[in-house]
Image (cartoon, rainbow, N blue to C red):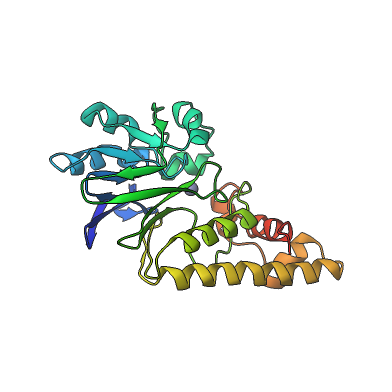
Amino acid sequence: MLEIKEYEDVIQIRMSREWEGKALYWVAAYLVDGLLVDTGCAHTAAELVEFLAGKKLAMVVNTHFHEDHVGGNARIEKYFSVPVYAAPASISIIAGKPFLYPYQEFVWGRPEPSPVLPVPAVITTPLYTFEVMATPGHADGHVALLEKNRGWCFSGDIFARQKPKFIRPEEDMGETIRSLERIMAAAPDKLVLFTSVGRIVENGRAALEENIRYLRDLARKARTLQQQGHSETEIVVELFGGEHLFAQMTDGQYTTANLIRSVLKMSH
Ligand SMILES: [Zn+2]
């Protein structure tokens, strides 16, 4: 299922597999002046192509290789023959067969391998200029697109919420903070975040600051407990009351323990 919303010149396309009449989990792509940022998951690829038919579409950028961001690539290439770009580090992954856990297959489906081109440092559309910023932390090769004149940032998954409670094992919170700081340094005062989880955050700067403050604070608390001799599991219990239910639902992938492990690795 698709839900469409407009914000200034940007069209938000929220997509989710429908299960028993309900949305399982939303992911958002954005269409702006012929540029499509991300392509959703395999389960919604046909609906996305249907929505795009007749719209202005000149190119696609994948913010990163995760299956809920590249799932529509192959079908879009087939029907619209437009270039699809991603960071060099993501290209071979998007062109290959990803390893997926059962929950990923169920919620998002398996993306068809698709050829993608290295994303240029700057993307221009007839009306806008987007700076392509390397923003690792959530995934290697993650990029965010910044339109400085409008204060728009298509932030992919580098920012999802101010206070994350669980992350995947490969996420690096120290790297994430550096990426968020890079966005803030490059962005104008007025910053709107177009996130992949579907939130359009108007006061983007304050949201990023809160996210960084939260992670640093969490790191401080976790480190203190570690110095007192507490184990990782005990720290999770102490700070969050135990592991999040999401851990079970995601084959042990999204966990609070991963978050604690990552913040403990952060330099002071
Ligand atoms: Zn992701």
Q: Is residue 61 visible?
A: yes
Residue depicted at x 42% and y 37%: 86
Q: Nearer the viewer, residue 261 or 233?
A: 261
Residue depicted at x 57% and y 67%: 212
x and y percent of residue 77 in the render?
Answer: 28, 29
Q: Nearer the viewer, residue 27 or 265?
A: 265
Give the left or right position of residue 35, taking residue 260 as reference: left
Instruction: Classify residue 83 by image quadrant.
Output: top left
Quadrant occupied by the C terminus: bottom right
Q: How many marks?
A: 0
Give the left or right position of residue 45, taking residue 237 as reference: left
x and y percent of residue 67 in the render?
Answer: 44, 40
x and y percent of residue 58 in the render?
Answer: 23, 38
| Residue farthest to the right, as pictured | 229
Give the left or right position of residue 243, taking residue 120 as reference: right
Q: Is residue 162 visible?
A: no
| Residue farthest to the left, as pictured | 54
Instruction: Classify residue 194 by image quadrant.
Output: bottom left
Residue depicted at x 33% and y 43%: 123
Residue depicted at x 62% and y 57%: 173
Give the left or right position of residue 27, taking residue 219 as reference: left
x and y percent of residue 107 in the render?
Answer: 42, 45
